[in-house]
Image (spheres, helix red, strand yellow):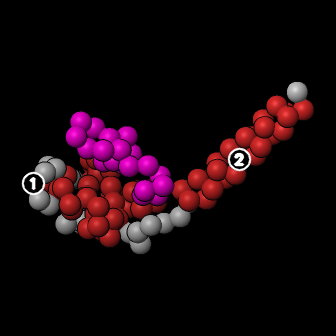
Amino acid sequence: MQKQYKSIRLLTLASLLLFGFSQSMASERYYKNGQEAYTKVCAYCHDTGVGPDSIKIKFDAASVDFRTENIFQTVRLGLNAMPAFRKTEIDDATLRDLSRGLATGTIK
């Protein structure tokens, strides 16, 4: 019985440490801004005809917020052939910058 409790405590401790590590990694920025993220990750498909080039269509001011959120959710959750990108792969701040840049036409 004592050995079983020790194993459970070690497993719990390991889980907490891994969770803490994953949370600290999620807050790290891997790209300095949305343009760099696009160039290093998205362009691989969206500039070569694999992914749709339509993501770079500039939207009017009234539609920018909706389009920004749509792009953000599509990248985070994935859709059809578009893979989901976790927070450990692209942080929220960079993804927001990327989404807004695409919606406003400032990312090429």
Q: Which residue is mark 1?
A: 49
Amino acid type of disc 2? Ala
> Which quarter of the rendered picture does the C terminus lie within?
bottom left
Q: Residues within 10 Å of mark 1 (few under 14, many from 20)?
A: few
Amino acid type of disc 1? Gly
Which residue corresponds to the image point at 26% horizontal and 44% vertical from the top-left?
A: 82
The spot of residue 38 in percent (x, y) is 28, 63
Which residue corresponds to the image point at 35% horizontal and 44% vertical from the top-left?
A: 84
The spot of residue 64 in percent (x, y) is 29, 51
The spot of residue 32 in percent (x, y) is 41, 72
- Along the horizontal axis of the image, is 49 left or right of 44? left
Mark before the other along the chain sequence, 2 or 1: 2
Task: Using the rendered image of the protein, determine whether residue 31 is visible from the camera's viewpoint.
Answer: yes
Q: Which residue is mark 2?
A: 14
The spot of residue 16 in percent (x, y) is 71, 46
Which residue corresponds to the image point at 44% horizontal and 67% vertical from the top-left?
A: 30
Which secondary structure, mark 2? helix
Above or below for 108 versus 4: below
Label placed on residue 107 = none
